Each structure stands twice: as C-alpha cells, then as structure tokens.
Amino acid sequence: HRRAGRQLQLVDELERCAANHLRRLLRSGAEALTLVERRLERMDLRVRFAEAHRRLDALRSGAEALMRGRTARLSAVFRPLAAQLAQLSPLRVLDRGYAIVQDERGGLIRSVAQAQPGSDVSIRLADGSVGARFVEK
C-alpha cells in the first residue's frame, strides 16, 4: 500500500511538473508568436504604404498651406506695383485717344520725316489695329 501510494504520489508529482512545463512552453511559444506577428505587421507593405501615404498627405497639406501663405504675401507686394505699371502702360495712352504708328518692319514712326509716301503702316488704337498707306507728307 505504502509503495503504491508513493508511486501514485510520484506519478501525480511528475504529472504536475509536466503540466507546469507544458504551460511554460505554451506561454513562451505564445510570446514568441506575438513578437513574430508584431514584426510581420511592421514588415507588411500595406501597413508601411498606408503610413507613408499618411505622412505624404501631411507633408502635402503643410506645403500647400505654406504656398498659399507665400502667394498671399507676394500678392500684397505685387498688387500696388501692378497698378502702377498699368498706369504707365502705353496702352492706357491709347484709351485716351492716341495711336501708335508702325512701319512695315514694326518700327515706330515718331516723326513725319520718317514717313515715306506709298509706304504701308499699321496704326494701333485702343481697341485694335488698322492698316494704312501714306500718300503724301
């Protein structure tokens, strides 16, 4: 009886040790599997591409905001300059009734002395151009 009892105790002890060992092995294997899964997730191209797209979108938004701000600042600087330039434009002079006369080669005719009888000229007015021919001085 005693010997059988000791044998049963030994079997129970071995069974408990084996169960504990298997639990430790399973826990260790599960932890290793979790680590491998995490590594695989980091290596997954879909995840990496999604993160890259998020970063790219953030950079694009930032760049667009910077460009809008820069454009607004430059517009504020150039708007008065454009108004001044428009006032100095020779085309504004045409709006007041003046004309620009050019010879056949496109050179300006500033004086009657430059006009040759029978030569063709172009007369630029505010709303377009007309052709003409000098007949006499």
Image (cartoon, rainbow, N blue to C red):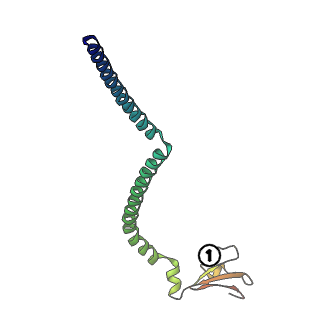
Where disc 1 sits, the SS reads loop
Rendered location of residue 68, percent (x, y):
40, 63
Say which quadrant the C terminus sits in: bottom right
Rendered location of residue 70, percent (x, y):
38, 61
Near mark 1 (Cα within 10 A), the count class, few <14, some 14-19 or many ≥20, is some
Question: Which amino acid, mark 1?
Answer: Leu
Query: Residue at 48% across / 41% down in the picture?
Result: 44
- Residue bearing the label numbered 1: 108
Quarter of the image where one finds residue 129 = bottom right
Query: What is the tally of numbered marks visible in this picture?
Result: 1
Rendered location of residue 29, percent (x, y):
39, 29
Q: Is residue 35 left or right of residue 126?
A: left
Query: Residue at 42% across / 75% down in the picture?
Result: 83
In the rendered image, the residue lying farthest to the right is 118
Pick the front one: 127 or 71: 71
The answer to whether residue 16 is above or below residue 136 is above
The answer to whether residue 8 is above or below residue 25 is above
Q: Is residue 5 left or right of residue 90?
A: left
In the rendered image, the residue lying farthest to the front is 1
Pick the front one: 50 or 125: 50
Say which quadrant the N terminus sits in: top left
In the rendered image, the residue lying farthest to the left is 2
Pick the front one: 43 or 72: 43
Query: Residue at 66% across / 74% down in the picture?
Result: 106
Q: Is residue 83 left or right of residue 102?
A: left
The answer to whether residue 42 is above or below residue 127 is above
The answer to whether residue 43 is above or below residue 6 is below
Rendered location of residue 28, percent (x, y):
36, 28
